[in-house]
Image (cartoon, rainbow, N blue to C red):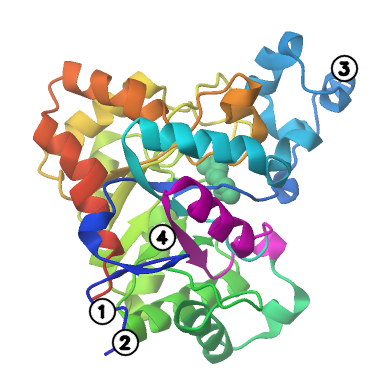
């Protein structure tokens, strides 16, 4: 039985699950997102190249992926540190940092931030979406990928002794590519060995979450210990959502704070607003899924930091929780979503 059993593994070492407190289960503190750059609309090239300024904020908020500099969250370590101190003051305890190989994971920075702020940080093992896979990764067998992921959890990742505490976010596109399927199978095999939490980034299609879960399931993964991220932009129809929920994964609404008219990555999608996210949580609770819900902001670009006029890492604690309570979600249910469910998920079997 690994030493992680019954514990949560942070970048500073193992902790008791009760030490976690309120937990955002899907954030990024340092990463790059150039792999997802969207060319600006014709006529917007000047805005896309301009420094970030107040007068451009609305454009930036609506076109975040067309501004190259906005995709470099790794340049904002000091601002992120300030945000984490505010997050603690607002009652936050822990953050799952989902940056995996392909989007510039930086474990020494995570360890430094954890030391300087007192926020428990849980780092992610494994690989992001196919476009970020190296030729070497693509050639690897499932067994080799499994070994690497297991090693990132048991011994440390990226040549450091800093150990990851979850597998993911494991990136998948739509349709899921062959290389991504191998990583999903390796994830399931590593999870079987370690009894660890897993978190998946689905492709941008309503069929994507179910397909990723099926691949994990067939490879022996523990779906009850797996989170499906980004449901805010993936499944809208209530009947389809309940069909997916029956598969048994955690259901994560992790784009709180994102309010956009057009979702740049898929113009067919009408991205949920925060009010609609809260309505969806209330719906899932009524349908009996309160033990399966997780929430977060998934901050991954500069413009969502308070330094750039964004909502920051404390938005859920300061604004969304009161809204949840005002819409009939009880304090006990809020605590389940923010404390108990993350604790159950993050504790190694
Ligand atoms: C690395 C951050 C990330 O993947 N965020 C998800 C963005 S979206 O696909 O939900 O738009």
> Considering the image in quadrants, where does the C terminus appear?
bottom left
* Location of residue 24 by image quarter: top left
For image coordinates 55% across by 63% down, the residue present is: 176
For image coordinates 42% across by 49% down, the residue present is: 118
The mark that comes first in sequence, 3 or 2, is 2
Q: Which residue position holds label 3?
A: 43
Q: Which of marks 4 and 1 is in front?
A: 1
Q: Residues within 10 Å of mark 1 (few under 14, many from 20)?
A: some
Give ligand 1's quarter of the image.
top right
Q: Which of marks 3 and 4 is in front?
A: 4
The mark that comes first in sequence, 3 or 4, is 3
Disc 2 element:
loop
Q: Which mark is residue 199?
A: 4
Q: Could you tell me how far apart the alpha carbons at marks 3 and 2 are, in whole angstroms?
A: 56 Å
* Location of residue 208 by image quarter: bottom left
Disc 4 element:
strand
Q: Could you tell me how far apart the alpha carbons at marks 3 and 1 are, in whole angstroms?
A: 55 Å
Q: Nearer the viewer, mark 3 or mark 2?
A: 2
* Location of residue 238 by image quarter: top left
Q: Which residue position holds label 1?
A: 5
Side of 259 relative to 37 (left or right): left
Does residue 298 belong to the magenta stretch?
Answer: no
Q: Is the Cβ of the residue at disc 3 closer than 8 Å to that at disc 4?
A: no
Q: Could you tell me how far apart the alpha carbons at marks 4 and 1 are, in whole angstroms?
A: 18 Å
> Which residues make up the magenta segment?
103-132
């Amino acid at each position: 039985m690994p030493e992680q059993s019954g514990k949560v593994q942070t970048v500073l070492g193992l902790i008791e699950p009760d030490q976690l407190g309120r937990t955002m289960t899907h954030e990024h503190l340092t990463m790059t997102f150039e792999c997802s750059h969207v060319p600006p609309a014709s006529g917007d090239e000047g805005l896309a190249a301009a420094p970030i300024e107040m007068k451009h904020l609305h454009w930036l908020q609506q076109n975040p992926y067309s501004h190259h500099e906005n995709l470099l969250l790794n340049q904002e370590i000091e601002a992120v540190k300030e945000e984490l101190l505010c997050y603690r003051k607002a009652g936050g305890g822990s953050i799952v940092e989902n940056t995996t190989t392909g989007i510039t994971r930086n474990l020494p920075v995570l360890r430094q931030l954890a030391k300087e702020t007192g926020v428990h940080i849980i780092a992610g093992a494994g690989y992001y979406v196919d476009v970020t896979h190296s030729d070497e990764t693509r050639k690897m067998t499932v067994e080799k990928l499994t070994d690497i992921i297991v090693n990132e959890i048991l011994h440390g990742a990226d040549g450091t002794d800093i150990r990851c505490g979850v597998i993911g976010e494991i990136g998948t596109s739509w349709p899921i590519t062959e290389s991504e399927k191998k990583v999903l199978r390796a994830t399931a095999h590593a999870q079987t060995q370690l009894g660890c939490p897993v978190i998946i980034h689905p492709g941008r299609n309503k069929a994507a979450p179910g397909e990723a879960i099926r691949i994990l399931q067939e490879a022996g993964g523990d779906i009850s210990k797996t989170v499906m991220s980004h449901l805010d932009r993936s499944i809208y129809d209530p009947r389809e959502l309940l069909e997916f929920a029956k598969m048994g994964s955690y259901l994560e609404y992790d784009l709180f704070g994102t309010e956009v008219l057009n979702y740049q990555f898929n113009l067919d999608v009408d991205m949920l607003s925060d009010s609609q996210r809260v309505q969806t949580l209330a719906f899932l609770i009524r349908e009996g899924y309160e033990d399966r819900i997780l929430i977060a902001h998934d901050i991954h670009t500069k413009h969502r930091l308070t330094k750039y006029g964004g909502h920051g890492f404390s938005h859920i604690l300061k604004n969304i929780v009161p809204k949840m309570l005002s819409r009939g979600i009880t304090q006990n249910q809020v605590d389940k979503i923010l404390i108990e469910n993350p604790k159950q998920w993050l504790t190694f079997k």
